[in-house]
Amino acid sequence: MSFFKRLKEKFTTSSDSISEKFKDGLVKTRDNFSNKINDLVSRYRTVDEDFFEELEEILIQADVGFETVMELVEELKTEVKRRNIKDPADVQSVISEKLIEIYESGEENLSTLNIQEDELTVILFVGVNGVGKTTTIGKLAHKFKSEGKSVLLAAGDTFRAGAIEQLEVWGERVGVEVIKQAEGSDPAAVMYDAVQAAKARKAEILLCDTAGRLQNKVNLMKELEKIKRVIEREIPGAPHEVLLVLDATTGQNALIQAKTFREATDVTGIVLSKLDGTAKGGIVLAIRNEMNIPVKFVGLGEKMDDLQEFDPEKYVYGLFSDAIEKAED
């Protein structure tokens, strides 16, 4: 059974609403990426060097990342030769296989959050202003609450005007308490209060917002180090996740931000917001392959439940759904 056929059987013959969210959320990237590959396939009678050169350009334009593209194309050439593939149409299925292999290289379950059983789980969110950090925190709070977990929010971004109020709006919308201090307060002091409140209320999840300034990396590093030090002193082993929120519509700039924050703190996972708003969704692969940081969540729309755990197979289904649905049974 071809890879496309397997994905068709898995996703198009079931009532999997999440795979449909990936299909709908990746429509801009699919129009940009998959349609160009379809055009490429239709123009070539055989798989030759010119074919691979054009494929490289398409992948780079989709923000898959130069290093990742070079690696992917070399693996494709090897696989095409090994399978003796002559028809360009057969290459699409191999591309989808290789995309998943690139993402899943590693031993751990990449998208799973490090949730503590019967103990408080602390998740720290970092990222520059305007990437959708507060919205992500609100949506994740909704997800946890809908799973029956007790959640608290910590308003650690005391620097940006309106940040505390924005988090409070989400707290009211979701129905969770926000621990805060006055604007301009020490973020580490807010975190201390939030941890104490979470312990007193026997909360299961504490989601912590932080300031999103990058102008002075030294100050950023010192602030994040202090926050983490305070949290770890009160809860050994915490924070259990440090999630970097990136705006998918910024393309390669998101990769630059990821490198900066990785230098500043131990980022354990990426939340890629606004993936539905970009035609360059290949940035998912560039981040994973070049940064070796897993994408744990992706934003696929404006609705409360449109923040979804990242799944490489559903991502590839979203990229190639038109071709997958046409695959012969």
Image (tube, grey):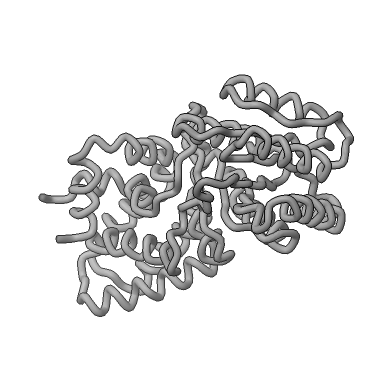
Q: Can you give x and y, in whole percent of width and height, for residue 35 in the image?
A: 35, 47
Q: Can you give x and y, in whole percent of width and height, for residue 178 in the image?
A: 69, 29
Q: Can you give x and y, in whole percent of width and height, for residue 72 in the image?
A: 42, 69
Q: In which quadrant of the rendered view does residue 236 lie?
A: bottom right
Viewer-side residue, 197 vs 54:
197
Q: Can you give x and y, in whole percent of width and height, for residue 125 in the image?
A: 66, 45
| Total labels drawn | 0
Residue 26 vs 265, above or below: the answer is above
Q: Measuring 82% from the left and 29% from the top, which residue is drawn there?
A: 161
Q: Measuring 33% from the left and 59% from the top, which residue is drawn there?
A: 96
| Residue 142 visible (yes or no) | yes
Residue 142 vs 125, above or below: the answer is above
| Residue 44 visible (yes or no) | no
Viewer-side residue, 223 vs 122:
122
Q: Residue furthest left?
A: 329
Q: Measuring 24% from the left and 79% from the top, which residue is drawn there?
A: 82
Viewer-side residue, 218 vs 240:
240
**Quadrant occupied by the N terminus:** bottom left
Residue 52 vs 254, above or below: the answer is below
Q: Is residue 285 left or right of residue 237?
A: left
Residue 148 vs 113, above or below: the answer is above
Viewer-side residue, 155 vs 273:
155
Q: Measuring 66% from the left and 37% from the top, which residue is drawn there?
A: 198
